[in-house]
Amino acid sequence: MSEAITHKIPVKHRLDKHVADVNVSSPADGQVLTYESATALWKNKPPTGAGENSWLHYRRAGAYHGPLLSGVYMNQALTSARMHSFPFYVPTTTTFDRIAIYVYTAVAGSECRLGIYGDNGSVYPGSLIVDAGYVSCGTTGLKELIINVGLSGLNWLTMLHSASGIYFSGIHYYYGWGLLGSSAWGTEVPRAMVYINQAYGALPNPYPSGGLMAGNVAYLISVRKA
């Protein structure tokens, strides 16, 4: 009767044999260990082709892109000192050079502040990425601000207005990318945005807690792909 014999190699010897083939530098969440044939080394890198299979990867350069919604075009008045934020997903890092809204009915002396927040990990706006400044809502038409920001993952396009009675172009929201869901399917319009009362001024950082989710109307805030 034969007896199996197991020979254990000390951990140190096993590591010493292969450590020269590994080059890990400043590892970050989500990275994977990838073999690089050009250097014959294993390195930490983002997953190959991350986001390439998503239809959201394809956005035309030089065009504006905003919340993923469908519905009937309409115009809607806003309440003063209220901040609205809309989810905006970018599968792979993409540079945007403008942020804009469209004023349909102006209010003399009024303004709207525009910016972008990152997600806090719980499908809610978190840290401020960019406060782009403000546009005048005292006249009608396209109002845009220059930005230079690379976005990836889930972000929140945000607007904060100074006065009631401004009408912005929007969508009477029927369907869309439903990451905000609804509280009871069949009895509530799917939610399209987060909103919260906020004194007009520079955008707060981080985003205030306690925001509410709502549907029905989504305002057309968008960013332009560089």
Image (cartoon, grey):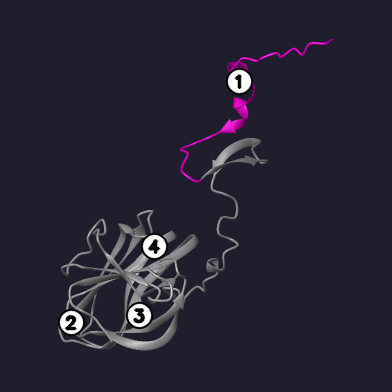
Q: In this figure, which residue is indicated by the disc labeled 1?
A: 16
Disc 2 marks a residue whose amino acid type is Ser
Q: In this figure, which residue is indicated by the disc labeled 3?
A: 216
- Label pair 4/3, CB-CB below 8 angstroms: no
Say which element carries label 4.
Answer: strand
Tell me where residue 99 appears, x and y as whole percent: 35, 72
Residue at 47 percent across and 63 percent down: it is 90
> Marks 2 and 3, Cα distance to the nearest angstrom?
19 Å
The quarter of the picture where residue 69 lies is bottom left
Closer to the observer: label 4 or label 3? 3
Disc 4 marks a residue whose amino acid type is Asn
Q: Nearest the camera: 202 or 196? A: 196
Closer to the observer: label 1 or label 2? 2
Q: Quadrant of the N terminus?
A: top right
Q: How many marks?
A: 4
Disc 3 marks a residue whose amino acid type is Asn
> Marks 3 and 1, Cα distance to the nearest angstrom?
62 Å
Say which element carries label 3.
Answer: loop
Whether 25 is among the magenta residues is yes
Above or below residue 44? Residue 49 is below
Q: Nearest the camera: 213 or 68? A: 213
Closer to the observer: label 1 or label 4? 4
Tell me where residue 194 appears, x and y as whole percent: 31, 68
Tell me where residue 24 appears, x and y as whole percent: 53, 35
Question: Magenta residues?
Answer: 1-30
Residue at 15 percent across and 83 percent down: it is 109
The quarter of the picture where residue 107 lies is bottom left
